[in-house]
Image (cartoon, rainbow, N blue to C red):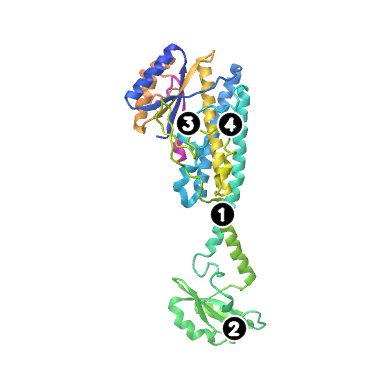
Amino acid sequence: MSEFWLISAPGDKENLQALERMNTVTSKSNLSYNTKFPIPDFKVGTLDSLVGLSDELGKLDTFAESLIKRMAQSVVEVMEDSKGKVPENLLANGVDLTSFVTHFEWDMARYPAKQPLVSVVDTLAKQLAQIETDLKSRTAAYNTLKTNLENLEKKSMGNLFTRTLSDIVSKEDFVLDSEYLVTLLVIVPKPSYAQWQKTYESLSDMVVPRSTKLIAEDNEGGLFTVTLFRKVIDDFKTKAKENKFTVREFYYDEKEIKREKEELSRLLSDKKQQYQTSCVALKKGSSTFPDHKVQVTPLGNPDRPAAGQTDRERESEGEGEGPLLRWLKVNFSEAFIAWIHIKALRVFVESVLRYGLPVNFQAVLLQPHKKSSTKRLREVLNSVFRHLDQVAAASVLDASVDIPGLQLGNQDYFPYVYFHIDLSLLD
């Protein structure tokens, strides 16, 4: 499953034993993979500041999750016919998302733990805000290009009444640069071909004999040329309409036709350049942590990327990719990394607020084996850690006790610090 539960419990002897019991039960029952989730010691500050940060981090968590979902969707849209390759382009620090989460290490270079918590949160917020600003501008430009291209492509579709004729007609179909003569295009229903051939010369005076030619047709009818004197155009159009022949308004302008074709070609080229198949493919390789048997699929080098190396420094590795896709990959990674750091900060702040000072707690990452086991896993956790909140735990066991804020029916009760990470939302 691409779902994770991030919990914490006090780090005293009793609760470390509770964690061991949880590991034993979940392992024997095949409920989840569990591994320690390392969080550095931060400067705690005042209680008031922690309460404020708790609220701010909650909002930032929601914003970061929304941002990476939008970026993942943008990757899907840009890759279009290559959607099967999307997962290998949604990476974090060069590895797949599951591996990054299960092997999380706090990035001291990006977010120094010695700084006040407020400063660390501010750095994360500014980073994500800048990514969102860039995402809006880049996707807006791409969508404008895509819309313009679709509008031009639509002109080459449809029937003879609506579609562009620039790719159908040629210079040889028309009498050009004549002071007196003009060539018109007439749409004739298929059942009326014979009638057209018999009557077009007599629809008006001054129609050039034997000047008609079928140059294109669709399921409904055909496009015929006819040459006549300019002075009888209006009369000819009226008579043609009476006979259910439609004169298609069209003026052959070689420069305009060339410009339209060049514009279509340019837009196609620009759109294609936004995405090209990546020449950097995922290579087989794996590493494991002894206490967590989750395979790591690194990009190129099976070793973990060097600490402090940013995705922007690795951007040049994406040669062969269009600029929008390359930007999305790099900044999706940046945003995802920031999101998991926000989760770690939330665990730290909530653990201090719930368990008190001095700071002493253990964070654990659980990966449920399957959706059907989550209910049983929740029951195990609530049972193991119910001593952390005896009053609330009693209310869970006794539904007759009504405590505001507890939703007993859907098991939203957590006597421990709990946060959810759902990567399936990015599929």
Closest to the observer: 185 or 15?
Answer: 15
Q: Nearer the viewer, mark 3 or mark 2?
A: 3
* The magenta stretch spans residue 422: yes
Q: Is residue 179 left or right of residue 387?
A: right
* Label drawn at residue 228: 2
Residues at marks 3 and 1, CA–CA distance in whole angstroms: 34 Å
Q: Amino acid at mark 2?
A: Leu
* Label drawn at residue 308: 4
* Label drawn at residue 101: 3
Q: Position of residue 34 (x, y in %)?
A: 41, 25
First in sequence, mark 4 or 1: give its number.
1
Q: Amino acid at mark 3?
A: Val
Residue 401 seen anywhere in this rendered image of the structure:
no
* Label drawn at residue 32: none
Closest to the observer: 85 or 403?
Answer: 85
First in sequence, mark 2 or 4: give its number.
2
Residue at label 1? 271
- The reply to whether the C-beta atoms of the residues labelled 3 and 1 are less than 8 Å apart is no
Residues at marks 4 and 1, CA–CA distance in whole angstroms: 34 Å
Q: Amino acid at mark 1?
A: Lys
First in sequence, mark 3 or 2: give its number.
3
Q: Is residue 350 left or right of residue 284?
A: right
